[in-house]
Amino acid sequence: MSRYERTQYFEALVALRLTYEARSDYDRMSVISIEDAIAYSEAVMAALEIEDRTAVVDEVTTERSAAMGDPRD
């Protein structure tokens, strides 16, 4: 990183910090607890895992049907 790039990066960090300082306390309040955020993320990950498994089952079923000459084709 050149001297110019370091200066630009530093200026961007300072501007970001000043922007956060200018915000009111309302913007700093949490709307979801850490426990709720963890529970939510676990639920999303479980749903994605189920979705992935369903996609694999659908793919295998389609392949088997094609290999067996499914009359519905």
Image (spheres, helix red, strand yellow):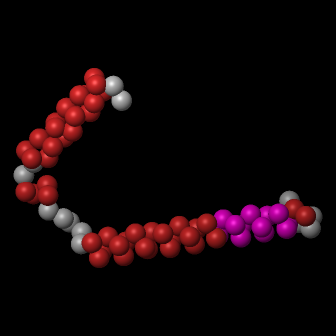
Q: Quadrant of residue 22?
A: top left
Front one among 30 and 9: 9
> In x, y percent, where is residue 14?
16, 38
Would residue 72 be visible to someone looking at this image? no
Relative to 37, 15 lies left or right: left
Magenta-tinted stretch: 54-65
Q: Position of residue 7 (x, y in %)?
A: 23, 28
Q: Is residue 67 left or right of residue 36?
A: right
Q: Residue at x 30, y 74 (%)?
A: 36
Residue 38 part of the magenta segment? no
Secondary structure mostly seen in the magenta stretch: helix
Q: Residue at x 15, y 43 (%)?
A: 17
Q: Residue at x 36, y 29 (%)?
A: 1
Q: Quadrant of residue 67?
A: bottom right
The location of residue 47, given as percent across then percent down, is 51, 71
Task: Between residue 39 and residue 66, name the one nearer to us.
Answer: 39
